Amino acid sequence: GIDLRVGAGELVGLLGPNGAGKTTLLRAALGLLPATGHSSLAALPPRDRARAAAFMPQSRDIAWPMTVEALVSLGRIAHPGSAGAAVDRALEALSIGALRHRPATALSGGEQTLTALALIFAVFLANPAPICVLDEVDAPLDDANVTRFCDLMDEMTRRTRTRFLVITHHAVT
């Protein structure tokens, strides 16, 4: 069996090769797959689970041809008064300000990942989730952007009491 506990304000990496079962383990822990054993998250009703944990899967599609700025702004719908500053800060943190007016659907895979990470950062500036699971979000990133991602994770860990679990096969991350 596996016993995993992540404390408030901790960042934990789950490192392993492709196909080792990292994603399956976390999907089961999040209650997204049936599993034996016990998961405190999976035991929660779906609504409570959605409030307790943010999850960014390793594959995600951007369905609408909206600008990067508009997409990142979606993370601030609950806090419209401070949206502009938070979006600017998120785009700056990931060095994607120049992409602001480009359609998100026209971006490369790495640029789409950076945009999705900027959305999470914009949300977490005001309303961090207690738990955040990021599944191999670093896979499409080049070395410079992996460093930016790591810096962002360090900052979010310092600013919030969120429990971060980052699944990766990159030893650098």
Image (cartoon, grey):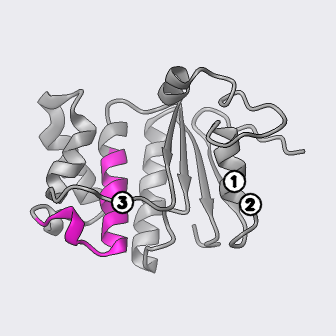
Q: Amino acid at mark 2?
A: Gly
Which stretch is magenta? 102-121
In the picture provided, is 98 more to the left or to the right than 47?
left
Q: What is the C-alpha distance between the residues marked 3 and 2? A: 22 Å
Q: Residue 154: percent from the left, percent from the top?
A: 49, 52
Q: Amino acid at mark 1?
A: Thr
User: Which secondary structure, mark 1?
Assistant: helix
Q: Residue at x 74, y 60 (%)?
A: 21
- Mark 2 touches mark 1? (CB < 8 Å): yes
Q: Residue 96: percent from the left, percent from the top?
A: 23, 65
Q: Main secondary structure of the magenta part?
A: helix
Residue at the far right: name it. Answer: 1
User: Which secondary structure, mark 3?
Assistant: loop
The image quadrant that residue 166 belongs to is bottom right
- Residue 105 lies within the magenta run: yes
Badge 3 or badge 1: first in the primary sequence: 1
Q: Residue at x 50, y 22 (%)?
A: 47
In the picture provided, is 53 more to the left or to the right than 110?
right
Q: Residue 45: percent from the left, percent from the top?
A: 59, 20
The image quadrant that residue 10 belongs to is top right
- Observer-nearest residue: 94 or 47? 47
- The quarter of the image holding the N terminus is top right
| Disc 2 residue crowd, few under 14, some 14–19, many 20+, Cα 10 Å | few
In the rendered image, which residue does mark 2 sit on? 21
Q: Amino acid at mark 3?
A: Asp
User: Which secondary structure, mark 2?
Assistant: loop
Q: Is residue 6 above or below residue 134?
A: above
- Residue 61 marker: 3
In the picture provided, is 14 more to the left or to the right than 144?
right
- Residue 77 marker: none
